[in-house]
Image (cartoon, helix red, strand yellow):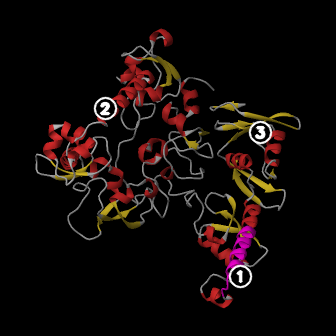
């Protein structure tokens, strides 16, 4: 069975037709089908089979290598992708072969240098030839422990320095095979599996909860297409589609037919494409043809054909020798006295680049708001400017390069970073506890209050619509004996609450 994706590719195997790869989020497989798929990667399952036969392609499966016997976790999608390109999935086998290939390549290069007359002692002194030291079990255990792992096994290679560590993340429990130098990066979960429990934050911040089952998206825009006032509503082909469904959302991926009001061209497109990037393929084709024709005409013209360009000419070259469509940079002087260097076509169509930049800056500064308004969560973590001064979230804007001392509102950890750096996606976590900006707990505190402490991650450490490897457990805020599992998407988009309370409210037992 295939869900939410493209049609699968099929191949024959013992026992009949089997799925090899699909574009969906999950696969429904019998035990034999999963065994066959893992067998293609020389793996076998080292955990119980799913009772319903349903496996998410991004979930980790605990497997055992049939060649070397190493036990490790791999995503189902990772296994499928590696099978497709013919690469070994087992990282113990892969890195062992990599060590051998690297060693052979190094020996070949050294032999080439020696054949060319190089002296072996000189190569040793220069660091070209090195003697690698073996990693002892105690060193491997210490290394793993320092970076959030526990050592499961130490695999020795053919030569000293070719060891591999089988490690298990203390936070998320994932077991992997790593080279010693890779262990230092830590687990990709960043040790954030637990984080700080909701309600135990170091700093309490008042904020408005985002309503669930709301008619608006998180950015405040209308959720339902019929109420959005979007331009694409004027393109809706009522003859082909009927009336716009009342429950159709602006970001729906369902395809409908649209009709260009200019040329009458009919075409199909998903709603989210029509909503965000509406264009008629027929009109676009005509526009491109017209642009090409106009460009051909302009290519035969120069600055002398345009009085404004000729008046601005401030270059040593003859204006009659530079075609209007040339990508050459020429020196020009605008009526405001700015000396600008740009192409003729850009000056003709957009004007002086310096004037344009100044106008853009003035408009941006006029409309720009301060951090306290644009990013209240980041403002809540502001402690003080590193170098002093009267700078606050009320007078510093987004993207500032000013270095600030920050304090995580959940764990209290303090560190220094610029406003700009904190707003980059790669830096939007607390380096100590893994709390993420825009988390479920920040945006939906009413849901976070029911987040079970048995879940393997804090609601401060995930975003509202993160893909999770588990279905969250919830504890009813009205009756702690009511415990159930439900996805965050269902709770947010559909506004579903405690199912037990719902039954009691409806008079069901």
Q: Residues within 10 Å of mark 1 (few under 14, many from 20)?
A: few
Q: Is residue 442 above or below residue 286?
A: below
Q: Earlier in the sequence, mark 2 or mark 1?
A: 1
Q: Nearer the viewer, residue 421 or 227?
A: 421
Earlier-in-chain disc, 3 versus 2: 3
Residue shown at the point (63%, 74%) measured from the top left: 143
Name the residue tied to disc 1. Answer: 115
Q: CA distance from mark 3 to mark 2?
A: 69 Å
Q: Is residue 104 magenta?
A: yes
Query: Magenta segment: does it hold 90?
Result: no
Secondary structure under badge 1?
A: helix
> Which residues, given as a range, are shown in magenta?
99-118
Q: Crowding at label 2, few (<14), some or many (≥20) Cα neighbours within 10 Å? A: few
Q: Is residue 35 left or right of residue 482?
A: right
Residue 288 position within the rendered picture, expressed as x and y whole percent measured from the top left: 39, 29
Residue position marked by numbered label 3 in the rendering: 51
Q: How many marks?
A: 3
Residue depicted at 20% across the width and 64% down the height: 390
Instruction: Kindly tell me whether residue 414 is visible in this rendering.
Output: yes
Answer yes or no: do the residues labelled 2 and 1 have beta carbons within 8 Å? no
Residue closest to the far top: 239
Q: Residue furthest bottom?
A: 121
Mark sitting on residue 485: none
| Mark 3, other Cα within 10 Å: few <14 / some 14–19 / many ≥20 | few
- Name the residue tied to disc 2: 297
Residue nearer the viewer, 4 or 349: 349
The secondary structure that most of the magenta stretch takes on is helix
Q: Position of residue 385 (x, y in %)?
A: 28, 66
Up the image or down, 417 lies above or below 114; here it is: above
Q: Quadrant of the C terminus?
A: top right
């Amino acid at each position: 069975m295939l869900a939410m994706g493209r049609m699968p590719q099929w191949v024959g195997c013992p026992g009949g037709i089997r799925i090899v790869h699909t574009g969906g989020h999950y696969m429904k497989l019998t035990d034999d089908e999963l065994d066959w798929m893992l067998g293609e990667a020389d793996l076998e399952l080292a955990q119980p089979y799913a009772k319903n036969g349903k496996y998410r392609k991004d979930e980790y499966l605990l497997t055992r290598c049939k060649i070397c016997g190493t036990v490790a976790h791999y995503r189902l999608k990772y296994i499928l992708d590696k099978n497709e390109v013919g690469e070994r999935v087992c990282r113990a086998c892969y890195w062992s072969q990599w060590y051998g290939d690297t060693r052979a390549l190094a020996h070949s290069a050294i032999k080439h240098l020696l054949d060319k007359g190089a002296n072996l002692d000189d190569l040793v002194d220069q660091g070209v030839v090195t003697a690698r030291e073996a990693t002892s079990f105690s060193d491997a255990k210490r290394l793993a422990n320092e970076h959030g792992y526990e050592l499961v096994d130490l695999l020795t290679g053919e030569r000293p320095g070719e060891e591999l560590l089988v490690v298990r993340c203390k936070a998320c429990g994932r077991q992997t095979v790593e080279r010693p130098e890779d262990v230092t990066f830590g687990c990709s979960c960043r040790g954030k599996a637990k984080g700080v429990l909701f309600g135990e934050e170091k700093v309490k911040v008042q904020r408005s909860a985002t309503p669930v089952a709301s008619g608006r998206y998180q950015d405040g825009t209308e959720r339902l297409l019929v109420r959005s006032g979007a331009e694409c509503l004027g393109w809706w082909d009522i003859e082909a589609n009927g009336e716009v469904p009342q429950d159709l959302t602006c970001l729906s991926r369902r395809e409908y037919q649209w009709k260009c009001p200019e040329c009458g061209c009919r075409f199909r497109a998903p709603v989210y494409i029509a909503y965000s990037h509406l264009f008629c393929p027929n009109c676009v084709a005509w526009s491109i043809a017209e642009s090409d024709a106009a460009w051909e005409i302009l290519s035969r013209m120069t600055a002398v054909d345009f009085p404004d360009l000729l008046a601005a000419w401030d270059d040593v070259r003859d204006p009659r020798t530079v075609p209007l469509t040339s990508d050459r940079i020429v020196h020009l002087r605008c009526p405001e006295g700015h000396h600008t260097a740009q192409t003729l076509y850009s000056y003709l169509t957009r004007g002086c680049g310096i004037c344009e930049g100044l106008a853009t800056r003035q408009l941006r500064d006029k409309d720009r708001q301060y951090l306290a308004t644009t990013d209240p969560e980041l403002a809540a973590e502001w402690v003080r400017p590193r170098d002093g001064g009267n700078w606050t979230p009320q007078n510093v804007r987004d993207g500032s390069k000013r270095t600030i001392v920050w304090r995580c509102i959940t764990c209290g950890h303090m560190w220094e970073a610029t406003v700009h750096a904190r707003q980059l996606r790669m830096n939007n976590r607390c380096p100590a506890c893994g709390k993420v900006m825009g988390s479920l707990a920040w945006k939906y505190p009413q849901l976070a209050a029911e987040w079970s402490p048995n879940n393997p991650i804090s609601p401060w450490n995930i975003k509202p619509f993160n893909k999770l490897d588990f279905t969250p457990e919830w504890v009813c805020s009205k009756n702690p004996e009511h415990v159930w599992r439900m996805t965050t998407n269902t709770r947010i988009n559909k506004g579903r609450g405690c199912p037990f309370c719902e039954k009691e409210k409806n008079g069901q037992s």
